[in-house]
């Protein structure tokens, strides 16, 4: 459910300020973005916001469906953009990100959990 919560948060930001409304603006990820990307890509512990932590019982099927739906909706918002360097999301922590920046963030987040899961299994 954590992935669904995180990506639904990003999706909601994109719905408030659709990527097409950011055309002409210069994307500039800030130092927090770079810190998080580096940390997550290397499996370093990164603090989790409390609103990104699932509460109560989590149903794996429901979590998977919500995550897939968020991914589909994000893709639909990115699809009309002219390219990966187009501004895509105004993030309150990371600044104005391009589509490529957002995808890199989502990928680093997934990689972080892959690394942390492998460590936890040992």
Image (spheres, rainbow, N blue to C red):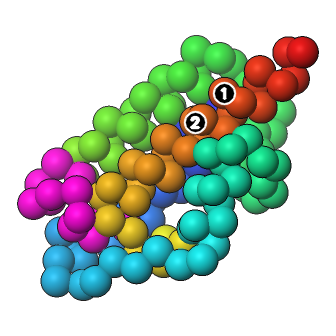
Q: Nearer the viewer, residue 76 or 36?
A: 36
Q: Which residues are magenta?
A: 78-89
For mark 2, what is the residue? 110
Which residue is at the far bottom? 25
Residue 88, image quadrant: bottom left
Residue 2, image quadrant: top right
Q: Residue at x 59, y 56 (%)?
A: 37
How many numbered discs, if any? 2
Q: Is residue 10 magenta?
A: no
Q: Quadrant of the C terminus?
A: top right
102 relative to 62 in the view: left or right: left
Q: What secondary structure is marked by label 2? A: helix
Q: What secondary structure is marked by label 1? A: helix
Q: Quadrant of the N terminus?
A: top right
Q: Position of residue 14 (x, y in %)?
A: 37, 63
Neighbourhood count class around disc 2 (C-alpha, 10 Å): few under 14, some 14–19, many 20 upward:
some
Q: Residue at x 30, y 58 (%)?
A: 99
Neighbourhood count class around disc 1 (C-alpha, 10 Å): few under 14, some 14–19, many 20 upward:
some
20 relative to 121 in the view: left or right: left
Residue 5, image quadrant: top right
Can residue 92 be seen in the rendering of this structure? no
Q: Position of residue 47 (x, y in %)?
A: 81, 57
Q: Position of residue 18 (x, y in %)?
A: 27, 67
Can residue 91 be seen in the rendering of this structure? yes
Q: Nearer the viewer, residue 22 or 26?
A: 26
For mark 1, what is the residue? 114
Q: Residue at x 77, y 21 (%)?
A: 118
């Amino acid at each position: 459910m954590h992935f669904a919560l995180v990506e639904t948060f990003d999706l909601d930001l994109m719905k408030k300020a659709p990527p097409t409304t950011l055309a002409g603006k210069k994307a500039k990820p800030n130092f927090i973005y770079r810190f998080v990307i580096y940390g997550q890509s290397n499996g370093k512990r990164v603090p989790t916001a409390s609103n990104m932590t699932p509460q109560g019982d989590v149903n794996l099927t429901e979590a998977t469906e919500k995550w897939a739906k968020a991914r589909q909706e994000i893709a639909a918002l990115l699809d009309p953009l002219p390219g990966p360097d187009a501004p895509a999301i105004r993030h309150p922590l990371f600044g104005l990100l391009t589509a490529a920046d957002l995808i890199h963030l989502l990928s680093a987040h997934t990689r972080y959990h892959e690394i942390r899961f492998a460590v936890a299994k040992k």
